[in-house]
Image (cartoon, rainbow, N blue to C red):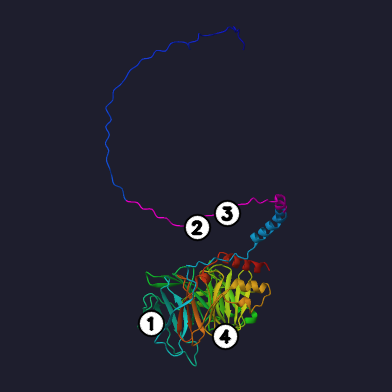
Amino acid sequence: MFSPHLNKSVGFPSTWKTNQQLTVSSTQTDEISTTENECQVLQAENAAVQTDAIIPPAVGSSSVDESSLLDFLRRITPKVLEELEKQNRSVAFDSYNGINEEEDHGTALLHTLRWPGLFAQGVVTGLSWSSTGAVVAVAYGADTHDTWCKHRSAVALWNLNRWEVNVYDLSDSESVAPVMTSFCGGSGVSCLAWYGNHVSALAAATQGGHVLCWSLNYAKQAMTLESAFIITEEDLPRGHRPGINSRSPEGGVGITSFSFNSEDPSVFVAAVEGGSLLLCTTLKQLPSSVSVEGMLCRRCVASHLAGHEGRVISVQCSPHHRNALLSLGSDDQLKLHSLLQPNQPVATLYSEAPLTAVQWSPARPVLVATSLFSGQVNFLDVCAVQQQQQTQADAAGEANKPLLSLPPLEKTAPVTAMRFSHANSTLLAAGDSLGRVRVWRLPTNVVSPHTADFPRLKAALERDAEL
């Protein structure tokens, strides 16, 4: 690790007095030539303006009591943080959307349609829009008869973009050649509906209690009966059984309206004569003694819902939530139901004026359109109705206050049919008992969905189930 070392000094001679060698030399370069030229510049002028003298703000030295400021901040900070936390938990502005000033929020009556060949006592019995929203189809019929019905039904099609009108007389089989036909058991058809979210599955409900489901083949122009169901008197609640005089010859009870579930096409709700609402399923296998076109009809009723005291005008499953359901009855009550709690409605709207039609908005989950006997159309927030009733507010006051109202025509008549355009949710068609059809453009801030709409509807349905 250690080795011997000789500690001996080392040095070298100084050289700072050594003489330096210098050499003088020179070089020659070319002579630099210069040239002088004159040039003319633009004439310049000076102008003066007078401005106010800028006086700098006086910044005085002010004394700050830092200890007093610190005491104030210590005293007020906990209260400010507490209020900010309350605002953070609040849901008061969950459904508030800022209004875009560039959007059109006005209401406009775009068209008033009336078929010139409308027969006496002709009323609008149905409305439908094409998938593009350009064509509106209007069905005409008669709702009152003194004797056997001899009225001719008709369908008029208006192209709102090009103003083409086609009218079909359905009773004239020679001039109207249907693409596909099928037998409905000999009873009048009360309503039709596409189900399963496609146009190849069609269902019909009849006044004889039948529910018939077809599959359509457009290439072969044929429709095949896939399943048949029947609702009998035994399927109704005991207090709502109409008796033998109201039954069809096959034993079925007339269906006034039906609607398929938006998420599960095997589930549908049917409204029958007498005001009963029935939850049905196409998966039920209990047979009956009735057959349609050689197919044995099955019993389809699974359970009962809270019905109406009178005829059910319309029943509609929500297009936004599988458990939400609307029903409108001749007792002037509009009910919001939950399939999770079928025994009692989530909310009930009581109307002093008779209600004639109802429609779910295809875009906004909590918005429904209702029509009055006077021809007025109102737009309601169904969750607002439910919340007002839970807080025991005036059910006929704030709870029923519409978000928007469409006035009737000068010559008033009951609205008999309404339909939103699925291609453009700002368009609504409403037909009345005088055969007139009004096409409205609605404000976007009313029909457009708000961020809190679906959570509010979901919470209302689940809250009712918990209660």
Write down the residue under mark 2: 52
Q: Which residue is mark 4?
A: 246
Q: Which residue is mark 1?
A: 167
Is tag 2's residue or tag 3's residue first in the polypeptide sequence?
Answer: 2
Question: Mark 3 — residue?
Answer: 57
Look at the image and tell me whether residue 235 can be seen.
Answer: no
Instruction: Say what secondary structure mark 4 lies in.
Output: helix
**Is residue 64 toward the left or the right of residue 164 in the image?**
right
Q: Disc 4 or 3, which lies upstream in sequence?
A: 3
Observer-nearest residue: 292 or 12? 12
Instruction: Specify whether residue 23 is in view.
Output: yes
Dot 4, how many residues are within 10 Å of its Cα: few (below 14), some (14-19), or many (20+)?
A: some
Spatial distance from mark 1 to mark 3, Cα to Cα?
82 Å
The residue at the point 41 percent across, 84 percent down is 115
In percent of width and height, residue 418 lies at 49, 78
Q: Earlier in the sequence, mark 4 or mark 1?
A: 1
Position in image of residue 401 (x %, y %): 60, 77
Q: Is residue 286 magenta?
A: no
> Is most of the magenta stretch helix, strand or loop?
loop
Q: Secondary structure at mark 1?
A: strand
Residue at mark 4 to residue at mark 3: CA–CA distance: 94 Å
**Magenta highlight range:** 43-71
Could you tell me which residue is drawn at 59 percent across and 85 percent down? 244
* Residue 31 sits above or below residue 376 on the image: above
Amino acid type at mark 1 = Val
Secondary structure found at label 2: loop
Counting residues from the N terminus, which is met first, the one under dot 1 or under dot 3? 3
Label 1 packing within 10 angstroms: few (<14), some (14-19), many (20+) = some
Disc 4/disc 1 C-alpha distance (Å)? 35 Å
